[in-house]
Amino acid sequence: MVAGPSRVAALREAPAPNQDNLGRPKSIACAAFLDHWTSIRGRQLVPTLSRFCETAATTFAPASSIVELQDNLVIVRFQGAELLQRWGRDMTGSDLYDTFSYYYRVRALSNIGKVAAYPCGYFGLNRLVLPDGARVASHFIQMPLVSGDGAAAYIVHFASTEPVDDPADGGANYYRTQSAAWIDVGAGVPPKPPHLLNLMKAVRR
């Protein structure tokens, strides 16, 4: 799953000055998250998991999740309080994509795998139908983290939501990516844009 020009060891390389954050979310909240991620990495290409956890507790943690990549599994290691309500269940210790169909699971794994492998960032806009039936626009950003010893890759996901009235959706799509793009953090980005996701009906999540 994690295939690209670099491996976990490369996450500690210094960023190239002329390639720093060439893509940027339009969402104010996600842009602030990106600025925070950039501010804590110091001279490293990617900040450590412990550094992020030390600095993001009050501002970003409630709307964040952290996953660990293990072969073709994406294991949720942390799920903020806002996401517990938004997802409708506690997914700590579970595979993030355990309810995705095979087709969209492969596409989601490809996206998140590239965030770790290059490494790079990934941001976009999802339209969601929540477990209580509410419709929201979810601006999201995913950024790489690395363990202190460099042996494990993590991805932190932050999302900011707002209610929407989208009758054209008709209730058929409960998870639809409207737009997505990569963020260059100093190691380049994949040559093709991220895969879009379009799950047709709500399943256990």
Image: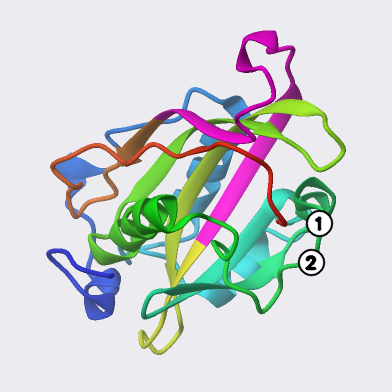
The residue wearing badge 1 is 84
Residue 79 in percent (x, y) is at 72, 63
- Quarter holding the N terminus? bottom left
**Nearer to the camera, 94 or 58:** 94
Report whether 131 appears left or right of 78: right
Residue numbers of the magenta segment: 156-179
**Nearer to the camera, 182 or 74:** 74
The residue wearing badge 2 is 90
Give whichever of discs 2 and 1 has the lower sequence position: 1
What's under tag 1, amino acid-wise?
Answer: Leu
In the image, residue 116 lies in the stretch drawn in magenta = no
In the image, residue 171 lies in the stretch drawn in magenta = yes
Report whether 193 appears left or right of 91: left
Q: How many marks?
A: 2
Q: State the residue at coordinates (40%, 83%).
A: 152
- Indicate the colouring scheme: rainbow
Q: Is residue 60 visible?
A: no
Q: State the residue at coordinates (56%, 36%).
A: 200
Q: State the residue at coordinates (37%, 48%).
A: 121
Residue 104 in percent (x, y) is at 42, 50
Q: CA distance from mark 2 to mark 1?
A: 6 Å
The kind of secondary structure element at disc 1 is helix
Q: State the residue at coordinates (36%, 84%).
A: 150
| Snapshot quadrant of residue 21 | top left
Residue 177 in percent (x, y) is at 48, 32
Instruction: Tell me if label 2 and label 1 are in contact, CB under 8 Å.
Output: yes
